[in-house]
Amino acid sequence: MTNLMLLKGFEVELFTGTYAGKNVGVASAITEDLSDFVKEPDQRNLEYITVPDQRYAVLKHALLLPRQKLRKWLNCQKLTILPGSTLSLGNTKIFERSDLENPYHSFIEKNYGTNVVTASIHINLGIENLSLLFSALRLVRCEAALFLALSASSPFLDGHVMDTHSQRWIQFPKTPSYVPMFINHAHYVKWVEEQLGQGNMQNERHLWTSVRPNGPERPHILNRLELRICDLVADVDLLLAITALLELRIINLTNNMKKYDPIEASSKTHEELALLADENDLLAAKSSLDANLFHWKNGKRINCRDWIRELLADVTPLAKELDIFELLQPIEFVLTNGNQAMRWLNSYSKGASIQSLLQTGISEMEQEEIDFIQMNSTY
């Protein structure tokens, strides 16, 4: 049954800083020494991209090996990798340019400032059939809030507790402000060309939404779905669980379009679905697993945890058939104990400082890499 599995790849954004949790920007120096990493407009974070693969064991290695390389480099500077998806201890008042000569970076700094200085995970799944790709985009956009809720890890900003679980998604500038539910490839191409012509997008990449089509020559040549809504997931096993749930939803869609494509299965129009999805995203950013969302099938309220459990029950037969059911288990832990943001906020309410929570997170990330290396020393 492995022929059902999709190619999967990740774009991982990370913050660098001190062991006390303070952000320190060194992206320019890192990218000169480590070819695996690329700069973001602000020096304080950087990105690496994994090679797509179907196999989850290979993906785990691909996610942790760059972190190990980066950590070795940072150790020489007495720096480390920071958990979380926002500038938890600041400073949001300044933009630390990684490339002063880059005109696109100038545009980003002028128009968005530090609202874009965040860390996240973009999950890419290979889908070359365009009809299936746009059906998958509709389903995933309507359920994107659930994936944000599982990954939320940004309740802090500038040393303060925010009234959100994903401050990153609240502050990140969704662009353009309204994105329709795309009916097909032709609809997407026409819309992108209109946005470029009107100046709402600076280029084909300037589509910052929860999920988007991606490929070598956007908008015309597409080969994958990119889920962009997730906060940084430091726990790789949880990230793979989230990815497995996403993949299983798309395989189920492939097997039964009428049941899973919102255009086919919802009582809502595609305009209503787009607004419903955007509203759910904001509700999940604020309250994550505690949010009461609107189900895309009928618009009725449903608790986020209950909806995720509904998805898990729905994909379980397929997960067992594909022998990846065990991969989903970290999601059960999150549903019972809360996501990273919720656990941090619970500890903060009991007296822990933001700095101490970040320091614990730093240690947990480092220990995950050590454990994996020890278990796979002959990989």
Image (tube, rainbow, N blue to C red):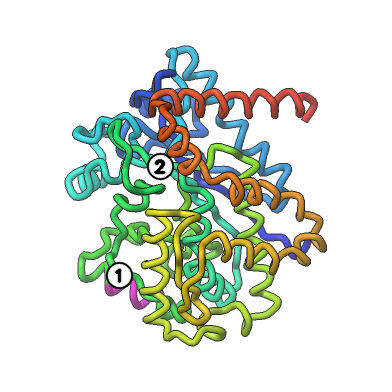
* Residue under the point 50% across and 58% down: 226
- Residue 154's label in the rendered image is 2
- Is residue 347 located in the magenta-colored stretch of the structure? no
Spatial CA distance of label 2 from label 1 is: 24 Å
Residue 164 appears in the figure = yes
* Residue under the point 64% across and 46% down: 333
Label whose residue precedes the other's in the sequence (2 or 1): 2
Name the kind of residue labelled 2 in the image: Ser
- Residue 84's label in the rendered image is none
Apparent side of residue 318 relative to residue 230 in the rendered image (left or right): right
- Judging from the image, what secondary structure is the residue with disc 1 in? loop
**Region in magenta:** 188-194
Residue 305 picture location, percent across and down:
56, 59
Residue 259 picture location, percent across and down:
63, 81
Apparent side of residue 208 relative to residue 326 in the rendered image (left or right): left
The residue singled out by tag 1 in the image is 178
Of 129 and 245, the residue lying toward us = 245
Q: Could you tell me which quadrant the N terminus lies in?
A: bottom right
Whether residue 354 is situated above or below residue 305 in the rendered picture: above
Q: Could you tell me which quadrant the C terminus lies in?
A: top right
Whether residue 246 is situated above or below residue 97 in the rendered picture: below
- Is residue 192 located in the magenta-colored stretch of the structure? yes
Of 137 and 319, the residue lying toward us = 319
Apparent side of residue 64 relative to residue 4 in the rendered image (left or right): left
